[in-house]
Amino acid sequence: MELPAEVLIHNEIMGFKGITGTLITISPDGYYEVNCLFGEQAHRTLFPVQGTVLIARDPEEVLRPDLEIER
């Protein structure tokens, strides 16, 4: 994932279930640095890597639609 990246944030502690944000960096100290909108203002927030799920807002492109994956 290239940074900055538009993401959906899931974090049980904060009660976030798919709120939008912009991932700025992933710290080696164990947190995500994300800009989130609260009201109409963007705020820099830190989320612990453990306990937070970030999903890229845009889906990945299908590079080879004819490719079948055997399961």
Image (cartoon, rainbow, N blue to C red):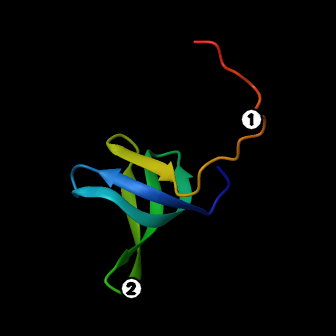
Residue 60 in the figure: left or right of residue 10 = right
What is the x, y in percent for residue 8?
A: 44, 57
What is the x, y in percent for residue 69?
A: 66, 19
Q: In the rendered view, would you say 2 is above or below 41?
A: above
Amino acid beneath label 2: Gln
Q: Mark 1 packing: few (<14 Cα in 10 Å), some, or many (20+)?
A: few
Amino acid beneath label 1: Pro
Q: Secondary structure at mark 2?
A: strand
Q: State the image quarter where residue 6 is shown.
A: bottom right
What is the x, y in percent for residue 10?
A: 34, 51
**Which mark is first along the chain, 1 or 2?**
2
Residue at the farthest front position? 66
Question: Mark 2 touching mark 1, by CB under 8 A?
Answer: no
Q: Quadrant of the C terminus?
A: top right
Q: Which residue is mark 1?
A: 65
Nearest to the observer: residue 13 or residue 7: 7
Q: Which residue is mark 2?
A: 41
Q: CA distance from mark 2 to mark 1?
A: 41 Å
